[in-house]
Amino acid sequence: MRMTPVLTRLAWRYLWRNHRRTIIMLSAIAVGSWAMIFMTALTRGMVDQMIADGISALPGHVQVHDPEFLDDPSVVNRITIPDDEFARRFDDAGIKAWASRVRVPAVVTSERESRGVTLLGIDPAAEREFSFVSYEDVEGRFLESPEDNGVVIGRKLADKLDTEVGKRIVLMSQDPDNEIADRGFRVVGLFEASMPTFEESFVFVGKATAQRMLRIGNATTEVVFLGDDYRDVDPTYQLVAERVDDGLDVKRWYEIDTYLGTMLRVMDGFVLIWVIVIFLALSFGLVNTLVMAVFERVREIGLMLALGMKPSNILAQIIIESMLLLAVGLAIGNVLAVATIQPLQDGIDISVVAEGMEMMGASSVLYPKLYLNDVVLANIVVLMLGFFASLSPAWRASRYEPVEAITKVG
Amino acid sequence: MSSVRCVDLCKTYRQGDQDVKALDHVSIEIDEGGFVCLVAPSGGGKTTLLNAIGGLDIPDSGEVWIADQRIDEMSKGELADLRLANIGFVFQAYNLIPVLTAQENVEFVMQVQGVAAAERREKSLAILDEVGLEGLETRRPAEMSGGQQQRVAVARAIVSRPALVLADEPTANLDSKTSDELMELFTELNRHHNTTFVIATHDQRVMRYAKRIVRMLDGRIVEDLEQDAA
């Protein structure tokens, strides 16, 4: 520790002895670390958006179903516990929001076309927290109550069905006895969604209206719960599981949408691999810089050893030099990353590749997400790998024999 | 009591296809407070002997003792500690650390020794003044002449009052006036602090200050004379 100030001073001065080389290396480290953080932020933003969209496609954070429902999503596998009972158990339980709904596959028919859709019978007030639809932006109007007799469909579905607000369509599904259950609805609203698929897939009707159509009394097929953070759903899951002990199936969102769950885990690994790959490219320049820096001061290293500096001090000096180089480069890279990500918080329009993004479940606007954890990870990994990369030139420098080093011809 | 004792030192270098005997069964004792000049033509073995005494070079055979410690069997770390605590070096060239100022170069050894900052500053300024470099404390080696650089190196070698100073051609880059001033300084340290000096030189002016002249040829001591110093 006693030697740290003198070693740091020497390392810093030597770093700037060949300032052109140092600036080039600093630029490479800064651009590399900027690329690490920026690309990570873009990818995180994309995955976050995919998950947010996925969750807003109505799973919530935790869901309760009949145990058979996910394999056979029909009203045969319904939840018979009434809403009053759920309200008694969850209204003061610390859950951010909950809603019950009727969700079944159905066929929608206009006078020209038929389409397979997911019929959602909802309570509009309870569903607001979960829905990907902005009620206020609906053309026409959104549903006003569970008793509403209208239907709200997506704009793309309306185009496919060649229908519009004010026209009538027919929804058809099956009742608990596997008999046809159908009913005519007037289109009261058209919604738009960030994911075109949503506009084609979902059809909203009042929950009570759906229950009457499907002849299921006050039963539902799905109860959804919202926690504070989709990355940490276990507290919500525990709370729901404790209060739903009726043989019903309680699942986290990533157990329902395994693709999204896997995507989230893969992303953590991807960030690490991305950081390591960029560092490997940087490490060639770093090692080369250190080797050159050592090579051009062999005699001075010999002098220091002759004056009584220990080989371990020479080793430490070269490593400190490398760490200073990396730290300054990383600091510049971090500032650059924040400065370039911040102005993009309103989103990057990538609609030119919207179809491809949609296939991945992502929307056509990308919102970069800068997480402190990712920045810290990138910095720590680079410093750690930089430490190991600088060991070899530092070790070589510390092994010089003083008399040979001093008399070395430059 | 002897400060330095070398017993039957041999050192052979490989130069191209030939083996060159740099030290050929050299034995010498230098008492504490000695002022010895090693005089030899180029390749005569004086620098090799100086390096062996300073623990910078390990002889092929023989023994090197500094005070009561045998140093030719010490590890690198032990040798570094010994040099740091007991020996001041003045080399012929490449003497200074180019990224440090004159004052920082002088402070360097004290800093490695762990001397407090205030004491380092006080001693380094005083010694720079003593070697005639007052006002040049903040200059880096590239901003000083060869003679000024050599004086900084001498200041660094003696600032922490080592028991033994080894100097290889210390006046090689100095004019006669500065050489005399430097040798006066060495003589004063030798007299008042009993510092032992071993100086490898060709310079007749330096030899005048020595109490003892050891002449070497082809790696062997051929003459060892006491004399009255100037």
Image (cartoon, coloured by chain):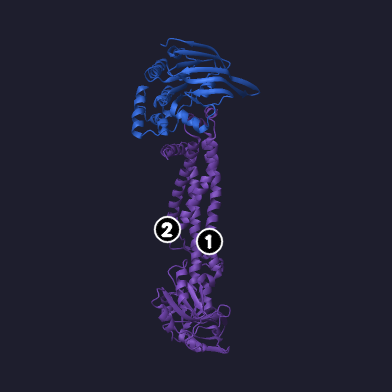
Chain colours: A purple, B blue
The residue that appears at 47% across and 41% down in the rendered structure is A321
Residue A69 place in picture, x, y as percent: 55, 80
Q: Is residue B34 above or below residue A405?
A: above
Can residue B27 be seen here? The reply is yes
The residue that appears at 42% across and 37% down in the rendered structure is A6
Q: Which of the numbered marks, if any, corresponds to residue A38?
A: none
Q: Which residue is mark 1?
A: A267
Cα distance between the residues tagged 2 and 1: 21 Å
Q: Which of the numbered marks, if any, corresponds to residue A342?
A: 2
- For label 2, the crowd category at 10 Å Cα-Cα, with few meaning under 14, some 14 to 19 and many 20 or more, is few
Residue type at mark 1 is Met
Residue A183 place in picture, x, y as percent: 52, 89
Residue A283 place in picture, x, y as percent: 54, 46
Q: Quadrant of residue B180?
A: top left
In this view, the residue in front, B60 or A212, is B60
Quarter of the image that includes the C terminus of chain B:
top left
Question: Is label 2 in a helix, a strand or a loop?
Answer: helix
Question: Is label 1 in a helix, a strand or a loop?
Answer: helix
Q: Is residue A176 above or below residue A347?
A: below
- Tell me the chain of label 2: A
Residue type at mark 2 is Gln
In this view, the residue in front, B26 or A89, is B26
In this view, the residue in front, A247 or A106, is A247
The residue that appears at 53% across and 47% down in the rendered structure is A282
- Tell me the chain of label 1: A
Quarter of the image that includes the N terminus of chain B:
top left
- For label 1, the crowd category at 10 Å Cα-Cα, with few meaning under 14, some 14 to 19 and many 20 or more, is some
Q: Quadrant of residue A140?
A: bottom left
Q: Are marks 2 and 1 on the same chain?
A: yes
